[in-house]
């Protein structure tokens, strides 16, 4: 399978991001008292997507894939 650059979207194409979200959901019930505003949630999501895309891009660069 050829690695591709993952663009920020609602689809969880990145396993790392999927793992983070899965863990977050698992902890959600235990930490219901922590309230996060919608704006903060969006910022966190955007940051996670950015990290995910950057990591994928670096992996492609290391593997010598044609961009």
Image (spheres, rainbow, N blue to C red):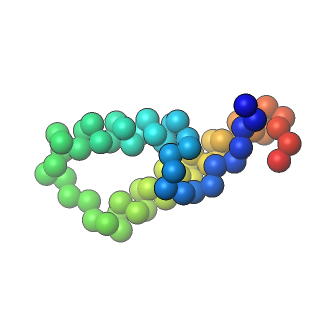
Question: Does 48 sit left or right of 60 as displayed?
Answer: left
The quadrant where residue 7 appears: bottom right
Q: Is residue 37 above or below residue 45?
A: below
Q: How many marks?
A: 0
Asked whether residue 33 appears in the rendered view, the answer is yes
Please provide percent x and percent y for residue 39.
35, 68
Residue 25 position in % (x across, y down):
29, 42
Q: Is residue 19 left or right of residue 7?
A: left
Task: Give coordinates of residue 59: x percent, y percent.
Answer: 71, 36
- Residue 47 visible, this angle: no
Along the line of sight, the residue nearer the viewer: 11 or 67: 11
Location of residue 65 (image quadrant): top right
* Between 48 and 65, the one nearer to me in the picture: 65
Quarter of the picture holding the N terminus: top right
In the rendered view, would you say 11 is above or below 29?
below
Instruction: Tell which residue pokes out farthest to the bottom in this image.
Output: 39
Of all residues, the one furthest to the left in this rendering is 33
Q: Looking at the image, which residue is at 34% across and 36% down?
A: 23
Q: Is residue 48 left or right of residue 41?
A: right
Residue at coordinates 64% horizontally, 49% vertically from top-left? Answer: 6
The residue depicted at 40 percent of the width and 63 percent of the height is 42
The reply, left or right, for residue 57 in relation to residue 12 is right
- Residue depicted at 84% across the width and 35% down the height: 64
């Amino acid at each position: 399978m050829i690695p591709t650059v993952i663009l920020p979207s609602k689809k969880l194409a990145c396993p790392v991001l999927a793992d983070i979200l899965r863990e977050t959901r698992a902890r959600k019930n235990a930490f219901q008292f922590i309230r996060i505003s919608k704006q903060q949630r969006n910022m966190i999501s955007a940051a996670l997507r950015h990290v995910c895309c950057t990591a994928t891009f670096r992996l492609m660069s290391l593997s010598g894939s044609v961009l």
